[in-house]
Image (cartoon, rainbow, N blue to C red):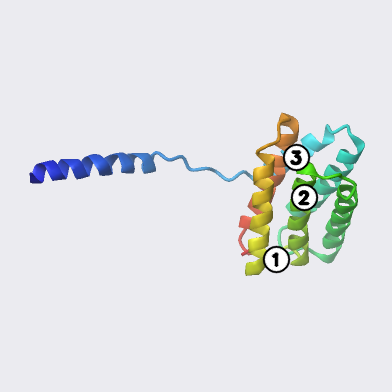
Amino acid sequence: MKFFTLLLAASLTVPTLVVTQNAPNVAKPDPKMTFGILKANVANITAPSEKERWQANKDAWEVEISQTGRIRKVELGKMMGSLDRIKANVSKLRGGSEKERWQANIALWQLYLTHEGGALGRADIAAAKAALETMKSNVAQIRSPVERQRWVANRDLWEATLDAPGMK
């Protein structure tokens, strides 16, 4: 009886250990490489209003990626200018999933720039996570591979930025 109990316990435990040991470690994408993907993708956009939105977003990321510490006033001004261009352009969108993605992106930029790239408070972390979740679920529904690539790169940049030391 003891042998049977031991055998049953082992048969239930061993598969669980094997599954957890073989679980792949998901590597976080490199922000500079991810930015390169976003930059190359944005360069190929042909629709003028979409190009304008994405160019402003790319410009803000370019400043962010080049930072090694807290954002200096000059860079903060450039990023705020890019955010203003994004907001003006997005305000012309009629609605739907495209506008929802951009509104989540704007919310993330606003939170980030309000704190000048520094640590976020608890409420801000919750708001950032909510905006990122909105973006993630929305991006998952994009059908165009080219547009999805752009948004996945943008989402990955936000994840890397929000996970960076000093942000929490």
Q: Residues within 10 Å of mark 2 (few under 14, many from 20)?
A: many
Q: Residues within 10 Å of mark 3 (few under 14, many from 20)?
A: many
Pick the residue in front: 33 or 13.
13
**Residue 6 % position (x, y):** 15, 45
Residue 126 has which mark? none
Q: Is residue 44 above or below residue 94?
A: above
Badge 3 vs badge 2, beta-carbon distance below 8 Å:
yes
Mark 1 Cα-neighbour bin, 10 Å: few <14, some 14–19, many ≥20: some
Q: Position of residue 90 (x, y in %)?
A: 86, 48
Q: CA distance from mark 3 to mark 2?
A: 9 Å
Residue at 75% in and 46% down: 101
Q: Which mark is residue 38?
A: 3
Q: Quadrant of residue 144 in the image?
A: top right
Secondary element type, mark 2 = helix
Q: Residue at x 78, y 39 (%)?
A: 39
Residue to which mark 2 is pinned: 61
Q: Amino acid at mark 2?
A: Trp
Residue behind mark 1? 118
Residue 58 screen position, x and y as percent: 81, 46
The answer to the question of whether label 2 and label 1 lie on touching residues, with beta carbons closer than 8 A, is no
- Res. 120 in view: no
